[in-house]
Image (cartoon, rainbow, N blue to C red):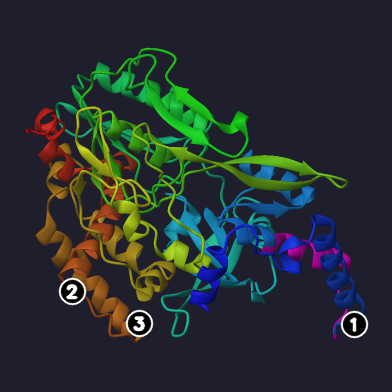
Amino acid sequence: MVAIALGLLSAGPTVRLSHAQQRSAYEELQAFSGVLNHVRTNYVDSVSYAQLVHAAIDGMLRALDPHSVFFSRLDYEKLNAIERGELAVTGLVLEEVDSAVTVLAVAPKSPAARAGILPGDRLVMVNDTSVAGLSVRTLELRLAGDKGSKVRLRLERGPRLEPDPLAVTVKRDFLQARSVSVARMVDSLTGLVRLEDFGPEAGKEVHDALNRLKGERMRRAVLDLRGNPGGSVISAVEVASEFFPKGTVVFRTRGRKRDVDTTYVTKRDGAFRDLPLIVLIDEHSASASEALAGSLQDHDRALLMGRRTFGKALMQTTFFVAPSGEILNLTIGHVVSPSGRFIQRRYRGIGVERYRALAGKGGAGEDTLQEYRTDGGRVVRGGGGIAPDVELPKPPPLPVWWSVAADSGFDDAISDSVASTLSGTAPARVAWLTARDEWRTKLLLPFLARVRARLKVAAQTDSALDARLAFNLAERVAEVRWGPDAREEFVFRPQAALGHIGRLSGLLAPPRH
């Protein structure tokens, strides 16, 4: 068949195309209408035109890319109410992946995060009702409600064929709508800013955070974009403007229509354009966070540390569809870094589930062959996502029994009891940050003993998982004994970054020839 196809392609302009290839748009629509009517009148079960048309639209969009989506005006208005903070939520961001409702992201400090739910978990039931056949938008609305009300969730984790079940109870709450969640000094010279997303005020929040840290004698900074799913491209440009001189290209967008082709540049000199900077990224950094990271890397403005980003950099816009005003979020362009790199991973020819599974793993091998150059001449490559300058290891995944134990309160019980025995002094707080032996003996070992006894599971661990579990338990101790500020200091203490920040000028220098 391949030889025949090649022969047809090389036969020249006299070759006649098949009738199917010549069919007009009108004929194609007639074929669709014919199938629609046959299904509507002859299918074994009763189905409405609305069901069929919406399913056809969903299938059409799925054939385009993994991110274009269609939903009703009513759902759109309710989702806007959630975004405005008028309904309490669980903190879950859901997406359908090969007919499974999958957790795309978990908001930090949210009820879902406290319950131990993780990205990649698949939602199976809500309050003893199966989610089969329900859209992601419907479920997001169902998960919202009054503050303090509870919702029982049943999930699966791990392989689809042999999943580990998980059941948790989540108490709905209002989430703080701020893009900057942490802004603090991590040593006498280094400030840390944690950017959760690119909300409408992200640029101002980053500026205010850095300005405050400058008043605390900050001389260098770490910008944490790990887990940042993106947001407004305008906000990304505003954040970038803090670190660049006026007129710097942040990124470009390219699409079929001329008005999509835009070059985004900074409109002012950044207040922190000379501040030594490290940026932390991982496989959950997506969209606007990737565009910002790629720009800072292309201009040799910051050292990127962590793991390759997700690989999503598509420009989308909202269209209102007549006659009922339904909503279409459609991809209209790609985001390109200043050096010319496409950030978006390939998605054609692979299922959505595989597309999600490849987050942070790059794209097709041939995409990485082409070299691009930063302003200083360093080699960077495409291939899907933004690869860091310094790779950091990925932490081990948390097992299902950890989430079950967290839902049962085992972790809090152990941590809270240890917190009550510690001194509330500043020296004790500082000592706890590095007391790994105490974390193990006072927290991890009693926790594992309780899990094995109460849940009747083996709870097997290795050294890497031991370290992560002990850290999670010690984090709770810090918050209970010394308050939320101590927890932030505990969690966002970028030791690996601090080891490189003193050598930034050399690491970002042009290559020697």
Q: Position of residue 447 (x, y in %)?
A: 26, 71
Q: Could you tell which of marks 3 and 2 lies nearer the N-terminus?
A: 3
Label 2: how many Cα within 10 Å (few below 14, some 14–19, many 20+):
few
Residues at discs 3 and 2 in contact (Cβ within 8 Å): no
Nearer to me, 502 or 415: 502
Q: Could you tell which of marks 1 and 2 lies nearer the N-terminus?
A: 1
Q: Main secondary structure of the magenta part?
A: helix
Q: Quadrant of the C terminus?
A: top left
What element does badge 2 sit on?
A: loop
What element does badge 1 sit on?
A: helix
Nearer to me, 164 or 358: 358
Amino acid beneath label 1: Asn
- Region in magenta: 44-59
**In the image, is residue 46 part of the stretch drawn in magenta?**
yes
Spatial distance from mark 3 to mark 2, Cα to Cα? Answer: 21 Å
Amino acid beneath label 2: Asp
Amino acid beneath label 3: Arg
Spatial distance from mark 1 to mark 2, Cα to Cα? Answer: 58 Å
What element does badge 3 sit on?
A: helix
Q: Is residue 160 above or below residue 241?
A: below
**Would residue 120 be visible to someone looking at this image?**
no
Which residue, given by chain and number where applicable, does mark 3 sit on?
454
Which residue, given by chain and number where applicable, does mark 2 sit on?
462
Q: Residue at x 84, y 62 (%)?
A: 27
In this rendering, position of residue 8 left or right of residue 86: left
Residues at discs 1 and 2 in contact (Cβ within 8 Å): no
Q: In the drawing, what numbered circle is on residue 42?
A: 1
Residues at discs 3 and 1 in contact (Cβ within 8 Å): no
Q: Position of residue 301 (x, y in %)?
A: 25, 28
Q: Residue at x 38, y 72 (%)?
A: 405
Label 3: how many Cα within 10 Å (few below 14, some 14–19, many 20+):
few
